[in-house]
Amino acid sequence: MRLLEKEFILKGFRFTQMEGNENFTIYLKENNVPVDSLSYYYCYEVIKIIKRNAESFNRFSTQIEMPSRELYPNDNNWGLQGWTFQDLPTAEGYFIKLSEKVDSTELMRVKKQHI
């Protein structure tokens, strides 16, 4: 599986992965090239990692092979699979909350399988 990049540039911003697990991660989002301290912008994004299976399809008579991969949520899913925070402690708190929710759901699923 192709994993999310640890660092990448998109739409004029540099994204740097701060911490994460198999389901969620935190990225620092900042100006790619800040001009001065007044124009510097940063925030933290907590995302649910989207996982896609390998697939193949035809496009303009060309066979396209896509490996299994992790994806960043798209703009349409912001608020459902991605969240923006102005400070790291708040982002970490939400990351922990989401991770614990998944862990407890997984624990309940495992318990039900053994009953």
Image: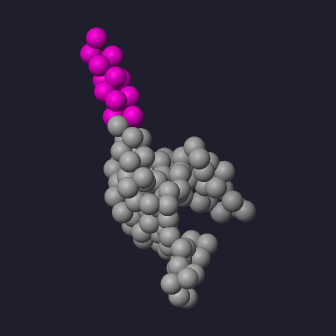
Magenta region, mostly helix, strand or loop?
helix
**Residue lying farthest to the right in this orientation:** 60
**Is any atom of residue 36 visible in this view?**
yes
Question: Picture coordinates of residue 59 (x, y %)?
Answer: 69, 59
Please name the residue shown 27% across and 16% down the image: 114
Q: Would residue 2 be seen by someone viewing this image from the given angle?
A: no
How has the structure been colored for display? Answer: one colour
Answer whether residue 1 is magenta in the image. no
Query: Would you say residue 109 sits in the magenta stretch?
Result: yes
Q: To which quarter of the image does residue 6 belong?
A: bottom left
Left or right: where does residue 41 sit relative to residue 94?
right
Residue 57: % across, % down: 62, 53
Q: Residue at x 53, y 88 (%)?
A: 36
Most extreme residue toward the top is: 115
Q: Nearer the viewer, residue 22 or 16?
A: 16
Horizontal side of residue 81 vs 6, given as left or right: right
Q: What residue range appears in magenta? A: 101-115
